[in-house]
Amino acid sequence: MKNRSWAFLAGGLLVALLLAGVVSNYASSHPDGLDSSLLKGCTVDADDNIVGGSCPAQQARDHELADSPLADYGVRGVRNSFVSTGLSGVLGVLVTFAIGAGGFWLLRRRGTTPTAGTTPTDATTPTDGTTPTDGTTPTDGTNPTDGDPATSDDVRRRADAAS
């Protein structure tokens, strides 16, 4: 990868880490519209506990991952909420980056191109009876796949010279 690409990638990762680690602490404490709509019809106190009324949120239960290390936008065991939220965001960015980088690495490994000295399997010498579209069409009106070895060799030489 070129140095410029690395700089762009590192800059993007740095911005994402800064946003997740610092700016996320200043986000709304009530960002979820679903939660607020489920509370319609209920009376809540300052700690968002339901104290009266009737609403769908009264039937809510914790999900299976409620005790996980990164539940509720924080890291379990870290007492400072600012650090806990920031650390949770940074870990999320790093895990997401690692998964994405691993996926791109796997795709790059699968899509290798032939190296010098190997026979290309692209459109330079078609086998389906069509003429190539890369400027190597013979000018004598013959089809390079008609079995004439001399014509096929001429087309291959022209393709090699063009590249």
Image: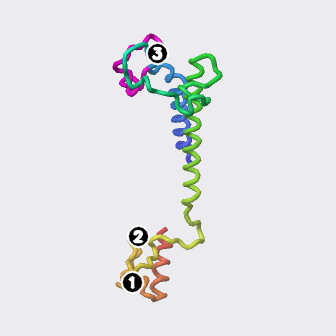
Q: Which mark is residue 91?
A: none
Mark 1: amino acid: Asn
Vertical side of 106 occupied by 93: above or below: above
Mark 2: amino acid: Asp
Question: Is 38 contained in the magenta span?
Answer: yes
Vertical side of 154 occupied by 28: above or below: above
Q: Tell me how far mark 3 sits from mark 2, CA to CA.
A: 70 Å
Q: Tell me how far mark 2 sits from mark 1, CA to CA.
A: 14 Å
Mark 3 near mark 2, Cβ–Cβ under 8 Å? no
| Residue 67 at x, y percent in the picture | 60, 28
Relative depth, front residue between 3 and 128: 128
Tell which circle, 2 or 1, labels the residue nearer the N-terminal end.
2
Apparent side of residue 76 relative to residue 18 in the rendered image (left or right): right
Check disc 3 and report the residue beneath it: 49
Check disc 2 and report the residue beneath it: 134
Nearer the viewer's eye, disc 1 or disc 3? 3
Tell which circle, 1 or 3, labels the residue nearer the N-terminal end.
3
Nearer the viewer's eye, disc 3 or disc 2? 3
Q: Residue at x 52, y 28 (%)?
A: 62
Vertical side of 114 occupied by 84: above or below: above
Colour scheme of the picture: rainbow
Classify mark 1: helix, strand or loop: loop
Q: Residue at x 54, y 44 (%)?
A: 100
Check disc 1 and report the residue beneath it: 143
Label 2 neighbourhood size at 10 Å, few (<14), some (14-19), many (20+)? Answer: few
Mark 2 near mark 1, Cβ–Cβ under 8 Å? no
Label 1 neighbourhood size at 10 Å, few (<14), some (14-19), many (20+)? Answer: some
Q: Residue at x 59, y 41 (%)?
A: 98
Bounds of the magenta segment: 30-47
| Residue 1 at x, y percent in the picture | 57, 48
Apparent side of residue 51 relative to residue 83 in the rendered image (left or right): left
Number of on-image labels: 3
